[in-house]
């Protein structure tokens, strides 16, 4: 079974993105899954074309996209993608859409098709802080999550898909003034979510 895991380039003036650092450290195999990875630009215009190309190349059975949520202290398994783009800050191309749908005429929301509750339970069983999240926000992560689920719903090639928000990495010697999680724990968390996704159904 092939799984595509994606992370985002740094954004908002930060030097690193925990989601990408973790994706780059994933092993080539997790349980029965062959792992393929891709980097997505933090850009409303470019992220979904990059994701679509990666899916076309890999033809995965499972797609897990990951992004960093710097204000969160737990691994957040996202449940709902909404058809809204509303940016608090500009993306990496300087775009800052307000109140625009991801897909004009698309459904208001999509639900993740990964076993979100089993994933959260598995993370907690491994003593990692984890939450089932009801909102991936309205920035580029939600945009990609919605576009991912729209692709899964409208393409012939079926795959299960979901989104994981991860905390920021600690910055030794510099108080970034917010919650963080070690890279080891984030990588372990991603592996656990992939494993849970490959087991269910
Ligand atoms: N986090 C942002 C976009 C890219 C990322 O890693 C978000 O939560 O929308």
Image (tube, helix red, strand yellow):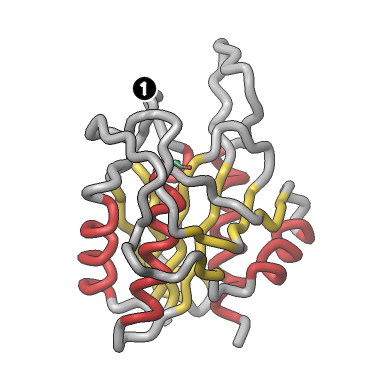
Which percent across, then down, holds residue 10?
A: 36, 34
Q: Nearer the viewer, residue 135 or 113?
A: 135
Quadrant of the snapshot with the N terminus = bottom left
Asked if one can make out residue 81 in the rendered structure from this viewpoint, the answer is yes
Q: Residues within 10 Å of mark 1 (few under 14, many from 20)?
A: few
Read off the residue under disc 1: 13
Determine the image quadrant of residue 117.
bottom right
Q: Nearer the viewer, residue 134 or 169?
A: 134
The residue closer to the viewer here, 168 or 1, is: 168
Q: Please tell me whether mark 1 sits on a helix, a strand or a loop.
A: loop
Quarter occupied by residue 16: top left
Q: Count of labels shown?
A: 1
State the image quarter where residue 63 is shown: bottom left
The C terminus, quarter of image: bottom right
Q: Position of residue 45 (x, y in %)?
A: 23, 48
Evaluate whether residue 25 shows in this view: no
User: Can you tell me which quadrant of the image ligand 1 is in?
Assistant: top left
The residue lying at 38 percent from left, 77 percent from top is 152
Residue 71 drawn above or below residue 166: above
Q: Residue at the location (40% across, 80% down)?
A: 153
Q: From the viewer's perspective, is 97 left or right of 80?
A: left
175 lies above or below 153: above
Counting from the top left corner in percent of width and height, residue 64 is at: 46, 64
Looking at the image, which residue is at 29% across and 46% down? 44
């Amino acid at each position: 079974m092939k799984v595509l895991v994606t992370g985002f380039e740094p954004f908002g003036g930060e030097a690193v993105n925990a989601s990408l650092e973790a994706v780059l450290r994933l092993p080539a195999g997790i349980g029965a899954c062959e792992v393929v990875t891709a980097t997505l630009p933090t850009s409303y215009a470019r992220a979904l074309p990059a994701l679509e190309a990666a899916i076309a190349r890999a033809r995965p059975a499972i797609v897990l996209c990951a992004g960093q949520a710097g204000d969160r202290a737990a691994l957040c398994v996202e449940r709902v993608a909404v058809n809204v783009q509303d940016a608090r800050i500009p993306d990496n191309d300087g775009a800052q859409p307000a109140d625009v749908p991801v897909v004009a005429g698309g459904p208001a929301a999509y639900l993740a098709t990964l076993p979100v509750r089993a994933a959260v339970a598995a993370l907690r069983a491994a003593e990692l802080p984890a939450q089932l999240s009801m909102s991936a926000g309205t920035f580029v992560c939600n945009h990609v999550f919605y576009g991912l689920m729209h692709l899964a719903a409208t393409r012939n090639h079926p795959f299960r898909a979901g989104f994981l928000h991860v905390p920021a990495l600690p910055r030794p010697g510099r108080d970034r003034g917010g919650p963080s999680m070690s890279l080891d724990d984030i990588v372990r968390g991603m592996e656990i979510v992939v494993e849970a996704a490959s087991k269910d159904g």
